[in-house]
Image: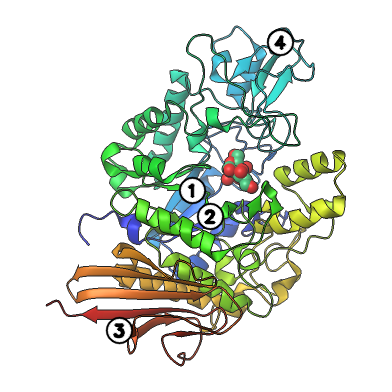
């Protein structure tokens, strides 16, 4: 379709380098490991690789704490390795998107070392430094400048004893937030981004980019407290930093300073916890010169009660309500991203599928339903193999700072450790971070050394070697699904209509391209989110329609019958009157 951005029919594959493939036996994945597995990506048919951070980092938050934005951490390799990866992907017709983590840096970044070292120096205002709450002494409980809780438990403020002042960190205490109110900070970030684009990368995934603008008082520079959180001494400061007062100004400035004139060839996606449909319309409206798409979090919170460590049963109707609103909300302007998994979410087949008897069926059903929505799909490493959550046995098995901090705080508050572990087994980010399962050998072909986090024992059954040549595998279904998006314009561009919104176990919708050269093209997408046979009330006009994709080897009795975890895509091409 002319004049439509390339990424509307593209599929993105996310690589979490620590856990993808290790080439030097140190138990941690690296760039040469990725270079050695490019055939896997070519066979899958993906168009873009999103690489989670590979920059120098003390790895306090697994690389999302960066101490040098313009180099490669020796653990992952060298700049030459990265240049080779950029070239190799381009030769294979794929693009590379890097992770941009500029809401915060590592506390080992020279900017922060300078900032902390001199309270009156030119770097101080590169971060958020504040004195203790009026009338209180540094270090006194409650003396933090605001009552904000960090996303990784505890206060969002850390005291610097040398200066007696606190610095802000929305995430770990080793991830101080940059002060985007300071134009020098913004200029330095834009220059860094331009240098990466000049090096040949094809865009950025922007970490918590909707948190860079804080609601600071123009009068006295103070930041407001938030409502106190139940069972916590802290408050929720998100109203003061999620979608802050200057966020669109900053994102538009970034677009002008970095992407203007070269954005057509690039992909930009902003990770935006808490973003709403209306805000996403503004961020992704091409006329506003901001971003191509955003990652929203509404669906990945549907099975959470009072936060991620309070898992609740998933209800399909809630998902349909949420996705239906995002599809409708970005139908006429903007664009959606589509994801079940990433390095922060547990494995979807274990979460909303069935990772036992129906692992392959439910994995392929979930993929079909997601990929046939209007938006750009993201495949997280291992998802294409139907990898599952990890049977963590004890706290010693976990590595993720968010999980470990939560466990420490919950147990210190008297919660039953086994109860806390049970929630972590379901929701911890470490479920996504176990090594990719390449084969059935001892460490799943990930490393010849000792993996930094244990390999899932089910790799003997679930692995790439067993799937890439098997037409009935999860991998082969993903390949067909990606081919369908490339070959059938209705998948990328068709109008979306939700069907059966109240059905408890079936997800059904259509995609329609009424003006296609072939005629009035319509797809019917069906997904059974249960292990039972289901009959659905579908328009008889679909009887006899063409089955373009299904996750069972044989055809169903009829279009209205769905077998356990079945997914099907039917096509009708009606001649135009
Ligand atoms: O994640 C932001 C974010 O929203 C997550 O921390 C989320 O709240 C949590 O993981 C859900 O359990 C981004 C990165 O994707 C994440 O890996 C980083 O830890 C975080 O920012 C800080 O950089």
Q: Does the CB distance between marks 1 and 4 fall below 8 Å?
A: no
Q: Which mark is residue 163?
A: 4
Find the distance from the CA under tag 3 to the CA under tag 1: 35 Å
How far across and how far down the image is residue 544, in percent? 33, 90
**Ligand 1 lies in quarter:** top right
How far across and how far down the image is residue 121, in percent? 58, 9
Q: Which mark is residue 407?
A: none
Q: Which mark is residue 541?
A: 3
Name the N-terminal-most of marks 2 and 3. Answer: 2
How far across and how far down the image is residue 182, in percent? 47, 18
Name the N-terminal-most of marks 4 and 3. Answer: 4
How far across and how far down the image is residue 483, in percent? 38, 72
As displayed, is residue 544 above or below residue 441?
A: below
Q: Residue at x 71, y 23 (%)?
A: 158
Q: Does the CB distance between marks 4 and 3 fall below 8 Å?
A: no
Find the distance from the CA under tag 1 to the CA under tag 4: 38 Å
Residue ID for mark 2: 299
Residue ID for mark 1: 296
Q: Secondary structure at mark 3?
A: helix
Q: Secondary structure at mark 1?
A: loop
As displayed, is residue 547 above or below residue 392?
A: below
Name the N-terminal-most of marks 4 and 2. Answer: 4
Name the N-terminal-most of marks 3 and 1. Answer: 1
Question: Can residue 350 be seen in this snapshot?
Answer: yes
Q: Any atom of ligand 1 within 8 Å of the CB at mark 2?
A: no
Q: Could you say which quadrant of the image residue 198 lies in?
A: top left
């Amino acid at each position: 379709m002319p004049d439509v951005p390339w990424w509307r029919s593209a599929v993105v594959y996310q690589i979490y380098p620590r856990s993808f493939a290790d080439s030097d036996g140190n138990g941690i994945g690296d760039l040469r490991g990725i270079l050695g597995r490019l055939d896997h990506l070519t066979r899958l048919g993906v168009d873009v690789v999103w690489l989670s951070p590979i920059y120098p980092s003390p790895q306090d938050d697994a690389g999302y704490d960066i101490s040098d934005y313009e180099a490669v951490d020796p653990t992952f390799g060298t700049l030459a390795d990265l240049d080779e990866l950029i070239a190799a992907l381009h030769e294979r017709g794929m693009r590379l998107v890097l992770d941009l983590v500029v809401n915060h840096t590592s506390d080992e970044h020279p900017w922060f070392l300078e900032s902390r070292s001199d309270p009156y120096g030119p770097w101080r205002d590169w971060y958020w430094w504040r004195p203790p709450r009026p009338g209180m002494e540094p270090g006194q409980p409650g003396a933090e400048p605001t009552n904000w809780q960090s996303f990784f438990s505890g206060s969002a403020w850390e005291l610097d004893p040398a200066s007696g002042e606190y610095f802000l960190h929305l995430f770990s205490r080793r991830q101080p937030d940059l002060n985007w109110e300071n134009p020098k900070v913004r200029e330095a970030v834009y220059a860094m981004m331009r240098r990466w684009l000049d090096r040949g990368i094809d865009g950025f995934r922007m970490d918590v980019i909707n948190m860079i603008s804080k609601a600071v008082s123009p009068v006295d520079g103070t930041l407001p407290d938030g409502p106190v959180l139940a069972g916590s001494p802290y408050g929720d400061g998100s109203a003061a930093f999620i979608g802050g007062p200057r966020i669109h100004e900053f994102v538009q400035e970034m677009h002008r300073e970095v992407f203007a004139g070269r954005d057509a060839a690039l992909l930009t996606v902003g990770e935006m916890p808490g973003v709403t449909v209306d805000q996403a319309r503004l961020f992704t409206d091409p006329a506003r010169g901001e971003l191509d798409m955003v990652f929203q979090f509404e669906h990945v919170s549907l099975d959470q009660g009072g936060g991620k460590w309070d898992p609740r049963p998933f209800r399909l109707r809630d998902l349909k309500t949420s996705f239906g609103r995002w599809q409708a909300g970005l139908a006429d302007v903007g664009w959606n991203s589509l994801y079940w998994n990433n390095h922060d979410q547990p494995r979807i087949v274990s979460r909303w599928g069935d990772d036992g008897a129906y692992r392959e069926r439910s994995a392929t059903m979930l993929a079909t339903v997601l990929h046939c929505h209007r938006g750009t799909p993201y495949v997280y490493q291992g998802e294409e193999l139907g990898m599952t959550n990890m049977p963590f046995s004890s706290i010693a098995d976990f590595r993720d700072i968010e999980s470990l901090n939560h466990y420490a705080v919950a147990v210190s508050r008297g919660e039953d450790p086994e109860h806390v572990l049970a929630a972590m087994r379901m929701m911890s980010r470490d479920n996504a971070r176990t090594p990719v399962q390449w084969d059935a050998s001892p460490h799943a072909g990930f490393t010849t050394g000792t993996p930094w986090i244990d390999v899932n024992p089910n790799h003997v059954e679930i692995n790439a070697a067993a799937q890439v040549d098997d037409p009935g595998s999860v991998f082969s279904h993903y390949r067909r699904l990606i081919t369908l998006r490339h070959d059938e314009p209705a998948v990328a561009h068709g109008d979306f209509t939700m069907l059966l919104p109240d059905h408890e176990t079936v997800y059904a919708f259509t995609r329609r391209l009424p003006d296609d050269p072939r005629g009035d093209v319509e797809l019917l997408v069906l997904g059974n989110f249960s292990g039972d046979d289901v009959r659905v009330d579908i328009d008889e006009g679909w009887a006899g329609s063409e089955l373009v994709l299904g996750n069972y080897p044989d055809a169903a009795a009829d279009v209205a019958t769905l077998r356990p975890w079945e997914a099907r895509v039917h096509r009708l091409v009606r001649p135009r009157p």
